[in-house]
Image (cartoon, rainbow, N blue to C red):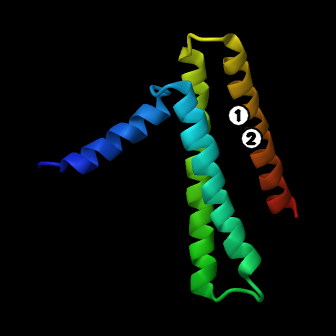
Amino acid sequence: MHMSNNKVQKHWLIKKVWYGQLPLWQQFWLFGVAGGLSLHLGLAIVLVGLTEPPEDYVANWILGFIIFLMIYTTWIFVGIWRSAKQYRGDSDWVIAAKLAVSAGVTLYVLMLIRVIVG
């Protein structure tokens, strides 16, 4: 079975990010900040735009997107952490990246607790 070059490139990128094999600045700024912010902002715009409870298919789409965001966020947090461990530059950047990931994980856990407990 032959995979297209485009599929191989996407698979390669997913693995590179997961294992922290891209430069720390790319992991953090491109995938963490730009990617994460745009995805979360997109969800926020949709949620703010709701004026009444959504139809079932819309609610299912939103739930699916939230699950995707959780997977994406886990993927990028792991990738940033691993990239920081491999970074050989100024240790302040390693500390900053790990603090940002730690803060992000803490916020996600607190949000999940709030959703579950109510």
Residue 16 seen in the figure: yes
Q: Residue at x 64, y 79 (%)?
A: 59
Judge from the rendering whether residue 16 lies leftward or rightward of residue 82; answer left or right. left
10 Å crowding of disc 1: few (<14), some (14-19), many (20+) = many
- Label at residue 104: 2
Quadrant of res 46: bottom right
Question: 81 or 114: which is nearer to us?
Answer: 81
State left or right for residue 19 relative to residue 109. left
Task: Name the amino acid type tagged 2.
Answer: Gly
Q: Quadrant of residue 40?
A: bottom right
In the rendered image, residue 42, in percent from the top left (x then y), is placed at 63, 65
Q: Are marks 1 and 2 in contact (CB under 8 Å)?
A: yes
Count of residue discs:
2
Residue ID at (80%, 53%): 111
Per the image, label 2 sits on a secondary structure element best described as: helix
- View extreme (right): residue: 118
Residue 24: numbered disc: none
Q: Residue at x 57, y 29 (%)?
A: 25
Determine which of the numbered discs, if any, sits on residue 101 in the image.
1
Residue 87 rendering spot, x and y as whole percentages: 56, 16
Q: Residue at x 55, y 42 (%)?
A: 31
Q: Where does the image place residue 43, in percent across and percent down from the top left? A: 66, 66
Up/down of 50 relative to 45, above or below: below
Q: Is residue 85 above or below residue 77?
A: above
